[in-house]
Amino acid sequence: MGKTAAIRVLHTAAECFPLVKTGGLADVVAALPKALRAAKLDARLLLPGLPALREALKSPVEIAQCGPAFGAARVTLLRGLLPDSTVPTYLIDAPWLYARPGNPYLGPDGREWPDNLQRFALLGWVAAQLAMGELDPAWRPDIVHAHDWHAALAPVYMAAHATAATGVARARSVLTIHNLAYQGRFSAERFGDLQLASWMSSPAGIEFHSELCFLKGGIQFADRITTVSPTYAREILTPAEGHQLDGLLRHRADRLSGIVNGIDTAIWNPATDTAIAAPFDAGHTAGKALCKQALQREFGLRQTPGAPVLGVISRLSPQKGLDLLLSALHQWLGAGGQMVMLGSGDPALEHACRATAQAAPDQVAVSIGYDEALAHRIIAGSDLIGVPSRFEPCGLTQLYGLRYGTIPLVHQVGGLADTVVDASEAAVREDRATGFSYRGAHLDELSHALRRAIDLWHNPPLWQRVMQRAMAQDTSWHAPATRYAELYKGLLGQVAP
């Protein structure tokens, strides 16, 4: 009996770590296809030809010319490999749309590029063309897996093509929602730029509250919808967290599921991490104390081993709850604690963070911006990692914290609820606790969680127990990749072995 062919999966997204990254999406897009290939699936990537990606693509081979399209006179599909990756990668080389430096979505003025509709419609359109077997004669995906609104038109274009007599089996589509708050909305007057049949401009298509909505279209037409944690999958069915799409999501709830993200445990490994001051692991934690000393020294904090260090690595926005953390910080500092923060975003929050550091320079340090190596040093050198988000689809920072024995303190929402077991008396006694969590984005709740963290810190044997249990968690992509593989097999009518 012949061997079953590997399932062919095309992951379509706008970002990929480390070359183009604005958030956790990039980390997922870099790591998940690699994990799927390790599980013997034929996973590939489709990305826009942004400068950093185009310049880094190794041994590019021209697969097809498919322009003019979406305002670009020249559109070339390339295939190659990105540095340090074994995942075959397609790049859409369309300089008119993508040859722009900096943020993939925003211009130098901080505003969205006015042609973002065409830029990301092209991404979905090329994915659909690959799914139809019209671009690469040597490879056609069984599954197109689109990530977030930037790729969400892929299922729409696939549905639009489905009635064509192609003589090939129809590829299936999966849409993963990484953050429902970002939806890709545009003026309805621009529908003609999308190269879709007129009926798609109606509520049965991609029209949404008199606008065009890429994410709504993806939700409407994808064969399966996933999001990045089971709790978030339930939350987005409610008006409170549904961002006006909860009605459609409830309508398609039988196609919706949540799969918690993993992290790349080769990159995030305290035993081999070259960015940190000293290696350590769950069995040999002395190096973590050296990482803490180095972090305190780097930021000019008091060199006090007995002072617990709270690390924060975050986009500075109201969603992330950092205004609450700054308001609660006085009790942490009053108990002798310290804080190191890395992030950027809302100007008012940036100013508030700087002012907090200036008021207590030997206890608080703030670095505005983002530095990947510094993020590793903060995770390794802190005792506690704070993730007080008002909502959080999955969150990766708390997973990094678990991996490095840096105990997470989180708001019990979304993926934070699914990945952190609160250090209640019972959970600590039963050796299940991995962090501190609290319900309700309120100052009193966060303050109480910080007090509990301080109390546990002053009981070193119990702190060590929680730290060891945290480090014992499997934060890798193995289990999530297995879940995705099972989802793909179900879509294709295959029985899992």
Image: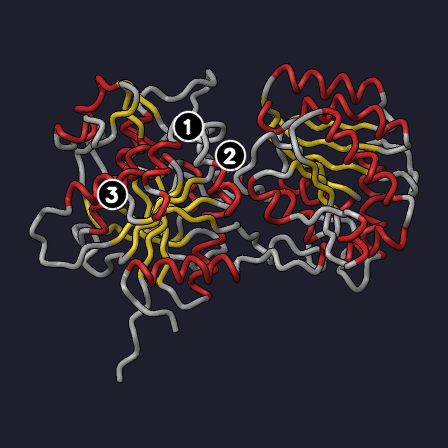
Tell me whether the residue at label 2 lies in contact with that at label 3, contact meaning CB atoms closer than 8 angstroms.
no
- N-terminal of the pair, mark 2 or mark 3, is 2
**Image height check: is 203 above or below 15?**
above
Q: Which mark is residue 126?
A: 3
- N-terminal of the pair, mark 1 or mark 3, is 1
Q: Nearer the viewer, residue 478 or 42?
A: 478
- Bin the neighbour count of mark 1 within 10 Å (Cα to Cα): few under 14, some 14-19, many 20 and up: some
Residue at x 90%, y 27% (from the top left corner)? 334
Residue at x 69%, y 59% (from the top left corner)? 272
Q: Amino acid at mark 2?
A: Thr
Q: Amino acid at mark 1?
A: Tyr
Pointer 1 residue: 105
> In what quadrant of the picture does the N terminus appear?
bottom left
The image quadrant of residue 337 is top right
**Image height check: is 405 above or below 387?**
below
Measured in 3D between alpha carbons, the distance from the residue under mark 1 to the one under mark 3, in whole angstroms, is 19 Å
Q: Nearer the viewer, residue 234 or 74?
A: 234
Tell me whether the residue at label 2 lies in contact with that at label 1, contact meaning CB atoms closer than 8 angstroms.
yes
